[in-house]
Image (cartoon, rainbow, N blue to C red):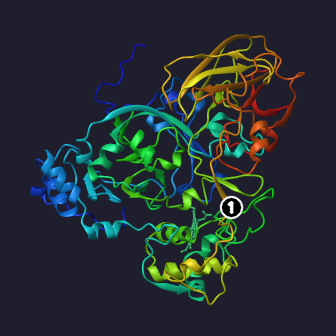
Amino acid sequence: MSRFPDIRTPPRAKTRGLGGRRAFSRLVLSASGILALLAGPAHAEGYGLGRAALPEEVAAWDIDIRPDGAGLPPGSGTAVEGEELYTDNCAYCHGDFGEGIDRWPVLAGGQGTLTGERPVKTVGSYWPYLSTVWDYVHRAMPFGAAQTLEDDEVYAITAYLLYMNDVVEDDFELSRESFPQVAMPNAGGFFEDTRPDTPTLTQAEPCMRDCKPGPVEIVMRARVLDVTPEEE
Amino acid sequence: MQDLGDGVDARPYGMPSGHEAHVVRRDVPWLTADPVSSVNFTPLHELDGIITPNGLCFERHHAGVAEVDPARHRLMINGLVDTPLVFTMEDIKRFPRENRLYFLECAANSGMEWRGAQLNGCQFTHGMVHCVMYTGVPLRHLLNEAGVRTNARWIMPEGADASAMTRSIPLKKAMDDCLVAFAMNGEALRPEQGYPLRIVVPGWEGNMWVKWLRRIEVGDAPWHHREETSKYTDLMENGKARRFTWEMDVKSVITNPSPQAPITHGKGHTVLTGLAWSGRGTVERVDVSLDGGRNWRPARIDGGSHPMALHRFYHEFDWDGSPLLLQSRAVDSDGHVQPTKKALRAVRGENSIYHNNGIQTWHVRAGGEVENVEVS
C-alpha cells in the first residue's frame, strides 16, 4: 500500500529497558537532556517508549512544503516542459485546459467568479500559496499514481498550472530560487475565523411563543429538485 | 417458534438481523467523479441513542480505504522536537489510555443545503456525522515523549493513504484534548475509519481527524496545505474566505419523523426524536417546534450529555393528523444558539459550503409523508 520506504525495525537493545533511548539521545542531542539526565531519573518526563528516528528515515518521510518554501527540494522545470507532462499524466481527468472532464476538479480559470453565484475555485482564482500546489501535486497526484513524479517534473507541472492560470509566461522556470517571485492572485483573499456571527445567549434568550407574525408558509420544497437517490 | 436456531458457532462475528438489511450507509453518486474520493452517509433515521454502530459511521476518503498492516505500521514524530521518534502500534498501546465519547462531523455536512432544500432525507442532509467511544492515547504523551521545543506552535498529522492527507492543528489543541486512537466502540478502528490509528480532534471538523496516521510533524507555523486552503475555507459573499474555521457549531436535526421515516401509524401518540451536538461543549437544551418555528417547547434529552458528543432528544405528543412543520433548535454550553438558515445566509451568503448548522424544517403531510422544505 504505502509508497514510502519501510522504516527499519528498531535495534532491540537500545530501545527497551530503563530510559535507554532517552538517555542516549538526550546526551547526544541536547544540553537540556544532559541536565535532565543528571538531575533525576530519565523517565521523569516520559515513558521511555518508541525509538529515535534515523535522519534518513525522517528525510524519506518528511515531504511537506510550507508557504515560505521550506521543504522544497533542489530541481527546476519550465511551463513548456510541464505542458507535455500535464498532457500525459493529468489531462485525462482535469482536461487539456484544466477545465475538468466530467466531475473531475477544474484546475484553471475562474478568476473574477468568487463573488458570483457559481464560484470556480482554482489554483489561479483561489489558492493563496504556491507551495500548496507543489506540495499537493507531489503528495497526491496523479490520482492513483501519487508520488511517482520526479521533483523536476513536479516543478515543471506546477509551472504549467501557473501558466494555464495566466500567472506566469510559458518560458517561466520554477525552482527553489524563482519560487518567491511568483505572486498568487488570491493571496490576500483569506481572513481568520470571525465566528460567532450568529445569535448567542448573551444577545437574547431564544424566543418560545409567537416568534413569527402569522402562520408559517412553505417557500421551497426539496422534491421539486428531486435529486435524492432512490432506495433500492 | 418450534424450529431450532443457529448454534453459537454459526456467527463468530454477529451481524444485524436480515430484516435490518436496509439500514446501510448510502452515497449520492452524482456528487463526485469517483467513489474512491467521495463520501457516504450515516442512516441517522434508523438509529437511536447516541452511539453510532461502527459499520454505519459515514465514510469520507480522498484516495480510498488504505489497507494497513498494524505489525508494519509506524507513527513518526518529527520537526521541532528534541528527539524525532518512531512508534510501533505496540509502543503506542503501552502509554496510558483514555476512553472518550466524541462526535465527528464533516465540515461539509448539510453543505448541499446552502442554496435551499435539496435532499429528501436526514441521512443525506445531516448524515456526515457519527459518534463513537474512542480508546486512545492523549497526544500530549507522545509529544512530550519526543520533547516539544519552546518555539513549536503547530502540528501536522499525515495519513498513510494515497492522498497522504495533512492538516495543520494548533499545538495548544494537540496538547489539550487530542487523542491518538486505535479503538472505537471497544473494538479496533474499522479500516474505513483509519485502522490501525487515527487522530481524534474533539469538536473540530472531521477532515482534521487524519486516518491511517503515520506521521506528526511539529512546527512553528501552519502549513496551509490543500485541505486548509482550496478546501475547508468558507467563501463569503464579498469573495473573501474564512480560514481555520475549526469548531463545529451547535446543531440539531429531527431524525424521526423525517423524509425516509414517515409517520405510518396515523393519528395518535407519537415519538419525535433527533440528535443535537456542539463542538464547543455540551448541548444545554433542545427546543422543538411543530409549526415551523412560531412556537417552541423544550425537548427531553436522554442518554447522557457528554461534551462534544451527540445528544439524543425526544418529544412525545398526540398527533391530530394535521400537517406539521417540524424544527429543532439546540443551545450549547458556550451560549451559542442554533441559527435559522435565513440568519446564516444573511451573514455568510450561499457559497461557503462548510459549517451549515441552520435549523432544518420537515413538512409532515396529513398522510404522514415527510419532505424537506424551507419556510417563511
Q: Where does residue B119 sit, x and y in percent of width and height?
A: 71, 40
Residue in the foreground of this view, choosing between B81 and B67: B81
Does B316 sit left or right of B323 as displayed? left
- Asked if residue A121 lies left or right of residue B213, the reply is right
Label 1 sits on a secondary structure element that is: loop
Camera-nearest residue between A18 and A164: A18
Q: Which quadrant holds the N terminus of chain B?
A: top left
Q: Amino acid at mark 1?
A: Gly
In the image, residue B176 sits, relative to residue A58, either above or below, namely: above
Image check: B151 left or right of A99?
Answer: left
Q: Residue at x 52, y 36 (%)?
A: B130
Residue A7 percent across, percent down from the top left? 26, 63
The residue lying at 70 percent from left, 50 percent from top is B352
Q: Residue at x 71, y 15 (%)?
A: B297
Residue A10 appears anywhere in the view: no
* Residue B219 visible within the image: yes
Asked if B169 appears above or below B128 in the picture, the reply is below
Q: Residue furthest right?
A: A214
Q: Pinpoint residue B336: horizontal percent, then vertical percent.
A: 64, 30
**Viewer-closest of A154 and B17:** A154
Residue under label 1 = A189
Mark 1, other Cα within 10 Å: few <14 / some 14–19 / many ≥20: some
Report x, y in % for residue B72. 26, 56
Q: Quadrant of residue B134?
A: top left
Q: Chain of mark 1?
A: A
Is B107 placed left or right of A41 in the picture?
right
Pick whichever, A150 or A24, lies toward us.
Answer: A24
Quadrant occupied by the C terminus of chain B: top right
Instruction: Report the residue at 27% width, 68% height from top.
Output: A55
